[in-house]
Amino acid sequence: MNTHLVKTLWPYVRPHWKKGLAALFLAIILAGLKWAQAALVKPVFDKGLSENGSMEETLMLAGLLMLIMVVNFPARFFHFYWIRYIVDKATCELRSKIYEKIQRLPIAYFNQNKLGILTSNIINDTQVFSGGFRASMDLVREPLYAIALLGLAFYRDWALTMIIFVVAPLFIIIFSKSGKSVKKNQADVQEELGNLTHNIGEGLGGQKITKAFNLQNYIMKRFEGTQNKFFTSLMKTTWVEEMAHPLVEFVGGLAFAGIIVFAHYRIQSGATSPGDFVSFVTAMALFMDPIRKLSQANIKLSQADAAEKRISKLLNLPEEIDEGELKHDKFLDKLTVKNLNFSYGDHNVLKNFNLEVKKGQKVALVGLSGSGKSTLINLLLGLYKPQKGEIEVDGILVDHIRLKSLRSLFGLVSQDIFLFHDSVKENLTLGKTYSTEQIDNAIDVAYARPFIDRLPNGHDTMIGDRGVKLSGGQQQRLTIARAFLQNTDILLFDEATSALDNESERMVQKALDQISKDKTVIAVAHRLSTIQDFDQIYVLSEGELIEQGTHEQLMGNRGEYFKLYNLGQK
């Protein structure tokens, strides 16, 4: 077994070592029972079924066989049950570790990689790895069976048994070649399965656009292209898998044919008895089962090895940088941005940007699309690190504040609405505990009461995937109620009304005004009429600050803000 695979497996198996030890003990018992089954064939054949055999001997031998079966039943049940427990529990723990790791990856990783690949890591790779878990258990149990049966065969007729040792190298060659080939091809299978998972996710998530643009044929063409690549890679692995099993049986059949011919001379010469031969044949017939299972285990371990490499690669990815040691979860004075620079690759998004927001102030960021407004929000939340410049909260560099503490200062209402496939209440509380009065107050402040009361089960109503059962305005009002319920010191509005119709925008804007009372607000705005009473307005163009002031001051300057405002009024 690959040493990397063992290192990955061991931490998950170790907590269940008692069950593993019990399963090993039962495997030894089961091996002994298989030995006994084959061994009893000789006295049954030589005595119980012979012309001189007595009924008493026959009944005794039958009773022994029954006793073997009685002991075999619970031993086999608990052995395989404990193995399944260890395997399935360890797989769940590994899946949890992968999912937890994904939560700690930086936001840039999700922007650069397919979500379907990550889904495949969590579901498909762990399932393949689970097969490797089981195969590793087979590598312990099946050799015990094989040794016990081979030992009996050697005891019954050592000369016949030597034929097995002659063909053994062929078994080893088959195992080695098939394992290497499967390992090589399985990496492609997992990669293409990840692409297929991603393709399916895209198709299911974009049904509205698919139907609106009559894209069904295009979507199916993309799907079938991806699926064909997956099928091709899968067939390469399947060819090796399905070739290995009959090859093992073919070699075993050749060995058995040789044994029959050689046994004829052994029996004729008196070197072995018919009873010994039948017992030997029984042992060999039972011996082929662990050989087949070892062949299967070898292939599954090769598949698991490919999955392990993908899993290890994911688990070793650099996590979101959090070097802060300070806890600062109360905004006391001001937030300052000094000479901030940020770029995506070669594209400069913010250039020497400066900003100051005092406690209780309302500050707006305006400018054309791509001017860096939303990027600044992401930087404030610590989702990205600036290449140059500083962000301070109450005079403390944000790099010195723990990310969890920093983010607890902000409540976000974004144009990118995300709601869970859960109840209204669960989407508001997000697993935290609030009183009924607090929840009702948040609903009222966000002007969400009218539509929530009309839902079949009020705030216990399930709202569908990403809130699909609600309108855009209703979804946004839920996120506003959620932000209010969190009761953070600073509210971030990232074009919260940009995708809404006029009536929905009016209701959402009222809700935003309500939750903004006595709060510090930083708002990215597209409709400038909503920010006329803000304390400061920052105008950005291509990442640079080109104007700053109140609405009246900027209108008087008749600069870029003046143009944007008049453009929005038309």
Image: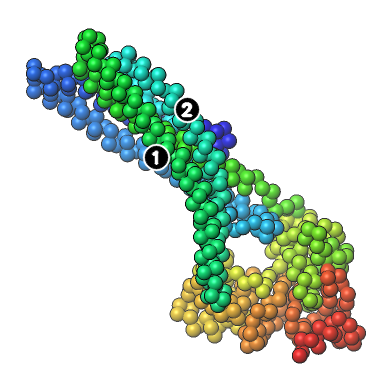
Q: Where's residue 83, x and y in %?
A: 41, 39
Q: Residue at x 34, y 38 (%)?
A: 78
Figure label count: 2
Q: Is residue 540 left or right of residue 177?
A: right
Q: Where's residue 314, x and y in %?
A: 62, 48
Q: Give whichever of discs 2 and 1 has the lower sequence position.
A: 1
Give the residue type that dot 1 points to.
Answer: Trp
Residue 376: give its label.
none
Q: Is residue 480 left or right of residue 292?
A: right
Give the residue type that dot 2 points to.
Answer: Ile
Q: Secondary structure at mark 2?
A: helix
Q: Which residue is mark 1?
A: 82
Q: Where's residue 98, x and y in %?
A: 57, 50
Residue 162 vs 348, above or below: the answer is above
Q: Is residue 26 visible?
A: no
Front residue (pair 248, 59)? 248
Q: Secondary structure at mark 1?
A: helix
Front residue (pair 214, 28)? 214
Q: Residue at x 44, y 40 (%)?
A: 241
Residue 173: give its label.
2
Quadrant assignment, res 155: top left
Quadrant assignment, res 544: bottom right
